[in-house]
Amino acid sequence: MPLNLFTDHPAAVGETYGEHLQVAGGFGLRMILGGIACLLHGLLPFLFTRTGSNTIALLHERMVISRRRGAAPPPGLRETAG
């Protein structure tokens, strides 16, 4: 299997393979936790009233907007819990 299968996409987004693994893993974990919060919110509407939308906004900021700017997201968005 050619090595570039593991490095082409990470390089295209300005990351090494290890960095991409870490970033994508973080995204996946946030998505899972946000999804669980949404499921619980559906059952108990008084819980996690903003978690789903906050998670989406955070991930959009990190993946799309910051990448276009070529900069990291503002410090306040880095550690915001959804």
Image (tube, rainbow, N blue to C red):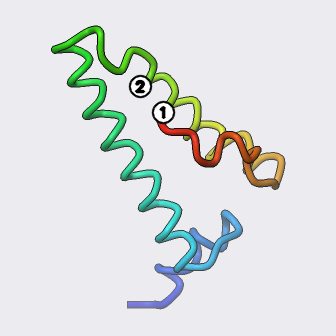
Q: Amino acid at mark 2?
A: Gly
Nearest the eye: 20 or 2: 20
Answer left or right for 1 relative to 9: left
**Distance from Cα at disc 2 to Cα at disc 1:** 5 Å
Mark 2 and mark 1 residues within 8 Å of each other at the beta carbon: yes
Q: Residue at x 21, y 23 (%)?
A: 40
Q: Secondary structure at mark 2?
A: helix
Would you place residue 25 above or below residue 11 in this image? Answer: above
Q: Amino acid at mark 1?
A: Thr
Answer left or right for 55 relative to 46: right
Answer left or right for 51 relative to 12: left
Question: Pointer 2: what residue?
Answer: 52
Would you place residue 5 above or below residue 20 in this image? Answer: below
Would you place residue 15 above or below residue 67 in this image? Answer: below
The x, y position of residue 35, in whole percent, is: 30, 33
The x, y position of residue 51, in whole percent, is: 42, 26
The x, y position of residue 22, in whole percent, is: 49, 69
Question: Pointer 1: what residue?
Answer: 55
Which label was assigned to residue 39?
none
